[in-house]
Image (spheres, coloured by chain):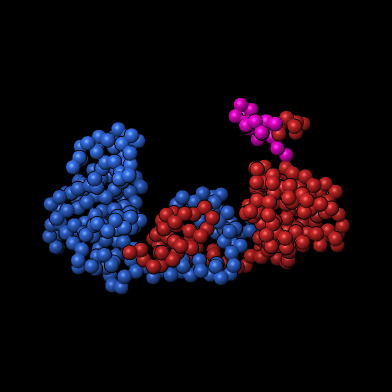
Chain colours: A red, B blue
Amino acid sequence: MIPDTIQKLAKLLSSLPGIGPRQALRLAFYLARLGKQEQKQFQEAVTTLSHLKECGECFAISEHSGPLCAICSDAKRSSKLIAIVEKDTDLITLEKSKKFTGRYFILGDLKKAGMLDTLHKTRLAHLRQRVKENGLLEEIIIALSPTTTGDLNAAMLAKELNGLAKKITRLGRGIPTGGEIEFADEETLNDAMRHRE
Amino acid sequence: MIPDTIQKLAKLLSSLPGIGPRQALRLAFYLARLGKQEQKQFQEAVTTLSHLKECGECFAISEHSGPLCAICSDAKRSSKLIAIVEKDTDLITLEKSKKFTGRYFILGDLKKAGMLDTLHKTRLAHLRQRVKENGLLEEIIIALSPTTTGDLNAAMLAKELNGLAKKITRLGRGIPTGGEIEFADEETLNDAMRHRE
């Protein structure tokens, strides 16, 4: 008794990350009840996605003209300092801090801990080739989350990246600014002690 | 530094119920990285929503040919027994039980507790007109959730519907099937006692 059109859209929506079948159905009905004008906005927003491309160096989603993204085309940003992140949204979050003057490299989601799939391997091969052509990097920052999985992946990546930069680092660990010592877990406190400044 | 196209889509997505700005951004990037074919599926699924209409009697989203939905066009379903629900998804859930032989009436989300907006009023006026033309209903079931807000809204609706049906009822309350007495709260136990059968 669910209209086919709704059923079909709900199925597509439930394929998106973090959206379950129940929310997908609710969203499909919500979209169905929007005005024609609003539905058109959604439709057009999805259509224009096809104008986006991937940056030829960092693999970020880009709408910058030319083969590189705005960051990789920016001569003021050091091409010798690279932060490796998993996702576009990680880049956005780091970039918001406005402190990083280097460039990025989007590896892609590491879905299986400690394992690289074809996509990751292709991108890393591209990075190696660039280093081969342009010389050793100053530093690669492996910007993965400091979780158990992230640590495992970072160790694997450090091996893969061996020889590409003078220094391979990770993001600092400790008590988050604004956080209370009282509520920090043991592991975080150990890290904070070890990385005291 | 977020591409405009992504920004725009993320903003639209965050206007959907249950989707926050962070998830919206993640979804926008996810959609941007889908293949052209998959993007097209989304676009087409949204486009075909325009073929849907609202049933002229129960206001459910319908793709049935003619002015009424499949349920309201079904002569085997009693037109004298009507269940009032807030949302299309409530109809779907009740209909899944396959026990209800009457018809539905979609009132629309009651966003402000105890208050009807123009949409609700227009639909209720339509129902009153139908009763005026076709005679008194046997029963109206006010199928709102048994929450505090739902109770408040049901009391208000009962007043609004006064004189339209011989009986105005609500869904039964008690311990859900499969639920344990041990974990039922006091209010539910009281309801279960009062409605013992």
In the picture, residue A1 is in which quadrant? bottom left
- Where B142 sits versus A42, above or below? above
Residue at screen point 56% across, 49% down = B22
Rendering coords of residue B2 (x, y %) = 64, 55
Residue at screen point 16% across, 59% down = B80
Residue at screen point 73% across, 30% down = A193
Rendering coords of residue B155 (x, y %) = 23, 43
Residue at screen point 64% across, 27% down = A181
Rendering coords of residue B42 (x, y %) = 50, 66
Residue furthest to the right:
A135
State which region is magenta: A172-190
Residue A183 forms part of the magenta stretch: yes
Residue furthest to the bottom:
B65
Q: Name the residue nearer the viewer: A137 or A68.
A: A137
Residue B128 forms part of the magenta stretch: no
In the picture, residue B176 is in which quadrant? top left
Q: Name the residue nearer the viewer: B115 or A46.
A: A46
Query: Where is the C terminus of chain A found, in terms of image quarters?
Result: top right
- Where A156 sits versus A53, above or below? above
Residue A83 visible in the picture: no
Residue B24 relative to residue A30: left or right: right
Residue B185 relative to residue A9: left or right: left
Count of number-bearing discs: 0
